[in-house]
Image (cartoon, helix red, strand yellow):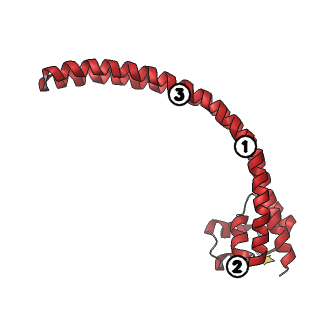
Amino acid sequence: MFVTVKMLQDHRACQDQVDLFAATFPDGVQATEAVCLAVAGKFDFAWAADRLLPRGARAEYEAKRVAIRAEYEAKLAPILAEYQAKSAVIGAEYEAKDATIWAEYKAKDAAIWAECKAKSAPILARYSAKHAPILAEYLAKRATIRAEYEAKLAPILVEYEAKRAPIWAEYLRQRAALFGRIAENLGD
C-alpha cells in the first residue's frame, strides 16, 4: 500500500500526524514492515489500520493485534503488580500518618467548637482565631508527610515506567510491523 499525505487528509488524520508524515515522507511511502518498524513509535498504526486498510485486511490486523496486546499485558502485569505493591505500602504509611494527625486536629477542633458553640456568636470569632493555627499546623504536618510519601513513591514510579517503557515500545513496534506486513501484501 502506498500512503500519501492526501490519503491521510482524505481519511481525516490528526493534523499533527499529517504534519509528521509530510515531514518524514514528503513524497509518500510504500508501507512495508521495514518502513513501519522504522517509525513504530511515531505514527498511530491503530488509526492507520482502522482507516487505511481494507475491511478484510483490517480484520486480520485486529485479530493479530489482539495477540500482540495480550503479550504486552502479560509482560506488564508483574511490573504493574510490583509497582502497586510498593506504592500500596507507602500509601498505607501515608494514610496512617494522616489519620493520626487528622484525629489530633479533629479532637482539638471539637473541643474548641464545643466551647464556642456554648457561648454562641461572639465566641465564633474566638473559635476562628483558635482554629486557624491548629488547621495551619495540621496542613503543615500533612504537607510534610505528603512530601515524604511522594518522595518515596517517585523512584518506584520511575522504576515502573522504566520497566514498562521497553515493553510498550516493543508492543508499538510489533503493531507497526503487523500493519506493515499486511499493507505490504495489499500492494498499491
Residue identified by numbered label 3: 147
The residue at 68%/68% (across/down) is 47
Distance of label 2 from label 1 (alpha carbons):
38 Å
Asked if residue 25 lies left or right of residue 13, the reply is right
Residue identified by numbered label 2: 7
Q: Secondary structure at mark 2?
A: helix
Quadrant showing the C terminus:
bottom right
Q: Is residue 40 visible?
A: no
Q: Is residue 177 above or below residue 133?
A: below
Looking at the image, tell me whether mark 2 or mark 1 is earlier in sequence order. Answer: 2
Q: Which mark is residue 77?
A: 1
Distance of label 3 from label 1 (alpha carbons):
28 Å
Residue that lies at the very extreme toward the bottom in this rendered image = 188
The x, y position of residue 22, in whole percent, is: 71, 71
Quadrant showing the N terminus:
bottom right
Q: Is residue 46 visible?
A: yes
Corner quadrant of residue 161: top right
The amino acid type, in three-letter code, at marker 3 is Ala
Asked if residue 129 lies left or right of residue 177, the reply is left
The residue at 79%/74% (across/down) is 57
Distance of label 2 from label 3 (alpha carbons):
50 Å
The amino acid type, in three-letter code, at marker 1 is Ala
Asked if residue 36 lies left or right of residue 161, the reply is right
Q: Is residue 154 above or below residue 25?
A: above
Asked if residue 8 lies left or right of residue 40, the reply is left
Marks 2/1 in contact by CB < 8 Å: the verdict is no
- Mark nearest the camera among 3 and 1 is 1
The residue at 84%/66% (across/down) is 35
